[in-house]
Image (cartoon, rainbow, N blue to C red):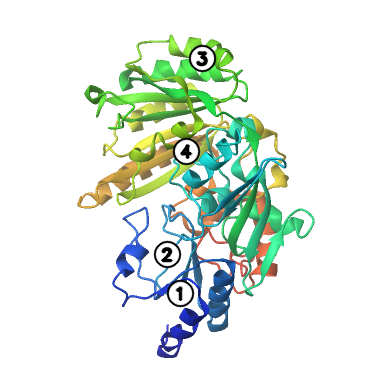
Amino acid sequence: MDTRTIGETEKLADALRGDLITPADPHYDQVRAVWNADIDRRPPMIARCADAADVSAAVTFAADRGLPIAVRGGGHSVAGQGLCDDGLVVDLSRMRAVTVDPGRRMVYVQGGALWQDVDPVTQAHGLATTGGIHSETGVGGLTLGGGIGHLMRRCGLTVDNLVEAELVTADGRLVTVNASTDPELLWGLRGGGGNFGAVVRFGLRLHEVGPTVLAGMLAYPLDDAPSVLANYRDLIVDAPDLLGTIVNLRLCPPIAAVSAHLHGLPIVAVVVCWSGGIAQGESFLRPLREFGRPVLDTVAPMPYVDLQRMFNATSPPGKRYYWRSVDTGPLTDEVIATVVTHASRITSPLSSSPIYHMGGAVGRVPAEDTAFGSRGASHDINIFGAWEPDRTDRDRHIGWVRDFSEAMAPHGVGQYVNFLNDEGADGVRAAYGRRWRRLVALKRRVDPHNLFRYNFNVDPGWTDEGDT
């Protein structure tokens, strides 16, 4: 950024109802901090927007000066996409209002909201939409990339419930995007990430859920993982959409739901969420709960909002994170053996390898209806590396993730865009697959200069030869 642009920051500050933070501000380091402490970027300007007009002013300022934009919603991106070193951060974290229209079964959510802002408000009406596994996850990033959650097999991905969005485009205009105003742009927002502008409000479809669900965790010694996973695989073949499950292989985390004597024990856990009738759920889950020798069974009726925040403590802000992922078909014996082998080599008590059960409503959405890929996947495996910020063995933890990822690659059928990390442009193109060219065409229309590039980027200059 040249001195002329630096000297013009006062113009932007005067145009904002919110605050413009620069490196000279005493709160700068606090404001620029994100969930992943492995990300350390120093943006020249952070516009902490108070409303959509602020977002429009910030985007216009950047566009007029050719400055790239990073949009920060919840700040939960493992790749740190809400920060940049050479442009303007449009920070939506002050914009967290949530409004429910129970008659239309819709919720309207500002772009900086977290799922912990949304779930209690919708559950007051006995309604919910698919949200993140952790309630501290931002609504914006999760929605725009896809939206895996406990309810996805019943309600679809978050992106499948995106009906409308208010978006500030690269030319600073505030537009309403829905199936009537711009169906192609709505398609791109349903899985295409933050490539097309700054979404200041989401309109999401709601479903009758809760307020009580049958949920909790079953845990077994990791030595039992092969038989536990084989039994789990057989059970979920005929699982109704009402059942959402996540298998996780890790060291038992020190969370309130788990007895202290189990903390640190190598385990395979099955997290369940049955969002239908409690008696029906208890009957269906009985074979799972009676199998083997579980060291823990916390499955019980509980408020859905409690389930949503149950695992927040397992990945708190301020740790260092690095991950990869792979979408797979069914859990074959070979897949199970590979997962167990590499999970047994875990390098940190903060790391884990959650396996999300897809299918159900996710798989019934036609592949071309959204930009989200891997509709046919049975599972998504997130190889999740995490360690304390003061550790000096970063390479060891990252090596575990990469080795695990490479071993799983032969079993892969795709990747979840929100679980990409540093795979680069080739990895982004591969994740989108045959949707890539359509996304490029849309990007050329709405952001031809790639102003919004701090994301899993769809470069408008891409050609078949890969020239940019």
Q: Position of residue 292 (x, y in %)?
A: 38, 10
Apparent side of residue 295 relative to residue 308 in the rendered image (left or right): left
The amino acid at mark 4 is: Ile
Count residues near mark 3 (Cα–Cα under 10 Å), then give few for <14, some for 14-19, many for 20+. some
Q: Are marks 3 and 4 in contact (CB under 8 Å)?
A: no
Asked if the residue under mark 1 is in contact with the one under mark 4, i.e. CB atoms within 8 Å, the reply is no
- Which residue is identified by label 4? 133
Q: Which mark is residue 285?
A: 3
What residue did someone put label 2 on? 83
Quarter holding the C terminus is: bottom right
Query: Left or right: 386 with respect to 459?
Result: left
Q: First in sequence: mark 3 or mark 2?
A: 2
Q: Which residue is mark 1?
A: 87
Q: Amino acid at mark 2?
A: Leu
Distance CA(mark 4)–CA(mark 2):
23 Å
Closer to the camera in the image, 231 or 286: 286
Nearest the viewer among 132 and 278 is: 278
Quote the CA–CA distance across marks 3 and 4: 21 Å
3 or 4: tag closer to the N-terminus: 4
Left or right: 31 as drawn, with respect to 125: left
Q: Are marks 3 and 2 in contact (CB under 8 Å)?
A: no
Q: CA distance from mark 2 to mark 1?
A: 9 Å
Q: Position of residue 65 (x, y in %)?
A: 53, 83
Neighbor class of circle 1 (other Cα within 10 Å; few <14, some 14-19, many 20+) is many
Whichever of callouts 4 and 1 sits on the residue coming sooner in the sequence is 1
Mark 2 neighbour class, 10 Å CA radius: few under 14, some 14 to 19, many 20 or more: many
